[in-house]
Amino acid sequence: MEIGNNLKLLRKRLKRSQEEVAQELNLTRSTYSGYENGVAQPNLDALVAFSEFYKVSIDELVKKDFEVFSEADWQRIDQGLYTDVKGQKLRVLTSIVNSDDEEMIELVPLKASAGYASGYADPDYLKVLPTFYLPFLSKNKKYRSFPIQGDSMPPVVEGSYVVAEYIQNWMTIRSGSPCIVVTKDEGIVFKVVHNLLDTSQSFQLCSTNTFYKPYLVHANDILEMWKFVNYISPELPDIRMDDQHLSKSIQDLQKEVFELKENMRKS
């Protein structure tokens, strides 16, 4: 394993001494030095601490050799971004096909949605989900259907199901796109997203219900992104066109105020 040398390279990249890093992590200098020199191997708690301090994933820290990193790799590390936002690594999705070899759309029931953040990559979790087929959708894309809870995204009401297209490369997401965002902490959320990857490695999530304030989610905290395609609703939308324009105007104003506050905070 390359852990020791990787730790050394990360520390030098930050221009910090072993003593400084050890103090930050509540370790003795000799203990930290032992990890860097390969005298001792860090346990899981130590790996988590290193991951959070250096803002790299444990998987990268353990499996990759940072000696061969390109400058682009190091820039990503410097930005604190370890999620593969461009989708360059293979993301395996479990898919169900029918007797005609047509890919089905998995529907995540409300009762199963709480476990989606931990089961989204588990074939055993996904293969028991109900499925359906929509012949008018592209056969070259992957779709899944998610339950909607709450009142934050009218005209899509609680009890509806959003059908969404899987997004491999998050850099391609256009600001203002409605998306299903699967996060580590919140699980499945449906929001209008604004792509801030270039400036803050984050997405701003906004509701069409202006009662709810926009907020930022760092790319490292996102598991999956799905672009809205259509939705199935138990209710007929009852929103006038003027209301839609007013809601959009308030959303834009909220976004501008949010960005202004962020810029003032950073300056």
Image (spheres, rainbow, N blue to C red):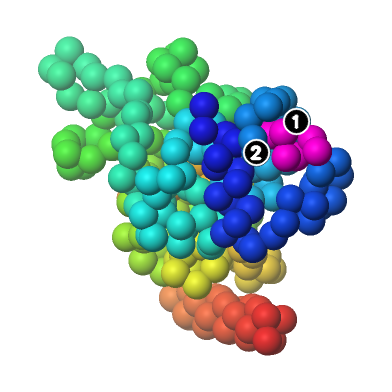
Q: CA distance from mark 1 to mark 2?
A: 16 Å
Q: Which residue is mark 1?
A: 45
Q: Which residue is mark 2?
A: 36
Q: Residue 170: x and y, percent? A: 38, 54
Q: Residue 109: x and y, percent? A: 52, 28
Please name the residue shown 53% across and 62% down the image.
79
Q: Residue 166: x and y, percent? A: 34, 43
Which residue occupies the foreground of this view, 85 or 257? 85
The 10 Å Cα crowd at callout 2, few under 14, some 14 to 19, many 20 or more, is many
The 10 Å Cα crowd at callout 1, few under 14, some 14 to 19, many 20 or more, is few
For mark 1, give the secondary structure.
helix
Q: Amino acid at mark 1?
A: Asp
Does residue 60 appear to the left or right of 142 in the view shown? Answer: right
Magenta region, mostly helix, strand or loop?
Answer: helix
Looking at marks 1 and 2 on the same chain, the residue that comes earlier in the sequence is marked by 2
Residue 74 badge: none
Residue 159 appears in the figure: no
Asked if residue 217 is among those painted magenta in the image, a careful observer would answer: no
Q: Which residues are magenta?
A: 30-35
Q: Amino acid at mark 2?
A: Glu
